[in-house]
Amino acid sequence: MSLAPIILFVYNRPSHTKDAIEALKKNDIAGESELFIFSDYPKNNKAKMEVEKVRRYIRTITGFKSITAIERNVNFGLSASVISGVTEVVKKYGKVIVMEDDLITSPFFLGYMNDALLFYENNEKVVSICGYMYPVKNKLQETVLFRIPDCWGWATWERGWDLFEQDANKLLDSLKARGLTRQFDLDGAYGFTRMLEKQARGKVDSWAIRWYASSFLKGKLSLYPHKSLVNNIGHDSSGINCRLNRAYGVNVSQNRVSVENITLEEDKLALDQIRSFFRGLRPGIFNLITKQA
């Protein structure tokens, strides 16, 4: 099996970056995987010192089949960096695993991602593979399909990323014209449409809300593990796009997740559980997350 290359987007958090790398290296197949690191340029003088610390660190990384570091000489910002980086790598390799510097992975993360990429490679219904699973209350089957392509440790193919529409106004107009905004918002459980509206007005800069809308409008689904293989440690207020918030915290699975045949439709139990999770978020969480999403 040809392993998918890994992309890691980093900026100005050296300790988070090191933790993310060390976790990835604990995966058995890390040494057989190619790693591409996109390091964004500091957007102001305040960020320069930490960006340089990150760059010094990534030049020392070992433990992967190959390591390619792309050090930007202008500031892209996370959204543009992800869009351009994923586009560049997936066009060359046909598939890609995407990470950010605040994601701690299970030792079984890369195995699951590559197994699922192979299993669903030719299945047009599935647009992405997700490593994160929300902290739901009830036990789910081994893997489930869900409408949202999550952005914390995910993978896709060129055929999937080709569906990505950058124009938020086009996406928003299509959702409204087809009367899909309530379904897009998980029956009112979360304000995804509001976030897309903010994107359209230039109030936020989120590639992820556009990725979700692009997938949703095409009727695509994404595969999730029953227990999370990724934990986001960036909700400690250290990041550009994350504010202090522990609601999404999980313990990563220390067991292998098997990828097997399941019904090719959205899992109703998973939908109910994830919808309940979003409804249970305390007031104000949405504004904290979307302020600079």
Image (tube, rainbow, N blue to C red):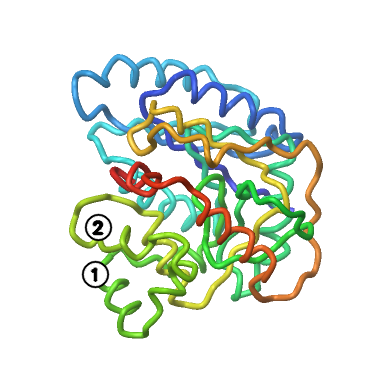
* Residue 206, percent from left and from top: 33, 52
- Asked where in the image residue 274 lies, by quadrant, the reply is bottom right
* Residue 90, percent from left and from top: 49, 55
- Asked where in the image residue 35 lies, by quadrant, the reply is top right
Residue 42 is tagged as none
Residue 169 is tagged as 1
Contact between labelled residues 1 and 2, with CB atoms less than 8 Å apart = no
Residue 198 is tagged as 2
Q: What element carries label 2?
A: helix
**Viewer-closest of 293 and 46:** 293
* Residue 271, percent from left and from top: 61, 66
Q: What residue type is labelled 2?
A: Lys
Q: What residue type is labelled 1?
A: Asn
Q: Residue furthest bottom?
A: 178
Answer above or below: position of 98 versus 166.
above
Residue found at x 47% / y 50%: 89
Residue found at x 40% / y 65%: 164
Q: Earlier in the sequence, mark 2 or mark 1?
A: 1
**Viewer-closest of 92 and 174:** 174
Q: Distance between the residues labelled 2 and 1?
A: 10 Å
Q: On the rendered structure, is 48 left or right of 56?
A: left
Q: What element carries label 1?
A: helix
Answer above or below: position of 95 versus 167.
above
Q: Nearer the viewer, mark 2 or mark 1?
A: 2
